[in-house]
Amino acid sequence: MAIKERAVQHESMAAQVKRELLRKIMNGDLPPGSRLIELQIAHDLNTSQGPVREALCELEALELVVTEPYKGSRVREVTPRDMQEAYTVRAALEQMAGQLAAPRFKGSVANLKKSAAAIREAARKNDIAAYAHHDIHFHRLIVEGSSNRILTRTWDSLAFEVRIQLRLSKGEVDLMAVQEAHWGIIDALDQGDGQLAGELLREHIVCFIS
C-alpha cells in the first residue's frame, strides 16, 4: 500500500512540475532556447529529480522541449510549420469526430451550449488561459462523442490546449470573432447533421491558423 501511495505522489508531483514548466513556457518566463537543468528545477520546486525528469520527457513528447546528449534539455521553439502540421491533423480528426458524434448529440446539446458560453465569456474578458481551457473542453466533448477510442487517443496526444495558448499568446487572434463558430457547430449537431458539423469544425480549425 505504501509503495502504491508513493507512486501516486510521484506521479502527482511530475504532473505539477510539468504544469509549472508549461506555465513558464507559455507566459514567456522560459523563452525558446532556455536551458532546463533538472537539479535546479527540482530545487526550485522542492522535489527530487525523478519527477522533473519525467515531466521533461512528457514535454519532449509534446515537442516543447528538446534534449541532446551532453547538452541537456532546453525549450524548443514551436515554429509556424509545427502549428500548421498539428492543426492540419486536428482539422481532419475533428471533421470525422463531428460526423460520427452527430447522432449522439441530436436534440441533446445542453453541455455543448454551456461550454460555448464559457468560451464566449473568456473571449469577452480576453482571458487566453480560460479560453484555451474551455475551448478544448468543448472540442473534447465532440471528440469523445465520436465513440472512437483511437481517434480520441490520437487527438489527446497532440495536446491542443497547450498549442492553443501558444497560438493565442501571439495576440493576433480576435477571440470574439473566432468563438462565434462554436454556435453554428452546435446547431448542426443539434439537428443531427454530421456532414455539416464536420465541415464547420474543419473550417473553424483551419481558419484559426490561417
Image (cartoon, rainbow, N blue to C red):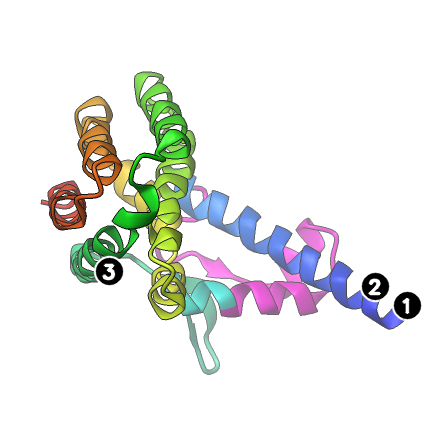
Q: Residue at x 28, y 57 (%)?
A: 78
User: Is the Cβ of the residue at disc 1 closer than 8 Å to that at disc 2?
Assistant: yes
Q: Which mark is residue 2?
A: 1
Give the CA separation, mark 1 to mark 2.
Answer: 5 Å
In the rendered structure, the answer to whether residue 166 lies left or right of residue 149 reads: left
Give the CA separation, mark 3 to mark 1.
Answer: 42 Å
In the rendered structure, the answer to whether residue 81 lies left or right of residue 1 reads: left
Q: Residue at x 66, y 64 (%)?
A: 51
- Mark nearer the N terminus (3 vs 1): 1
Vertical side of 19 occupied by 157: above or below: below
Figure quadrant of residue 146: bottom left
Q: Residue at x 16, y 59 (%)?
A: 88
Residue 65 seen from this side: no
* Quadrant where the image shows the N terminus: bottom right
- Range covered by the magenta-colored residues: 29-57
The kind of residue tagged 1 is Ala
Q: As rendered, which of 86 and 100 lies closer to the eye?
A: 100
Q: As rendered, which of 105 and 166 lies closer to the eye?
A: 105
In the rendered structure, the answer to whether residue 99 lies left or right of residue 69 reads: left
Q: As rendered, which of 85 and 68 lies closer to the eye?
A: 85
Q: Residue at x 43, y 48 (%)?
A: 25
Residue 179 seen from this side: yes
- Mark nearer the N terminus (3 vs 2): 2
Figure quadrant of residue 80: bottom left
Count up the numbered dots.
Answer: 3
Vertical side of 162 occupied by 52: above or below: below
- Secondary structure, mark 2, is helix
The kind of residue tagged 2 is Glu
Q: Is residue 45 magenta?
A: yes
For label 2, the residue is 5
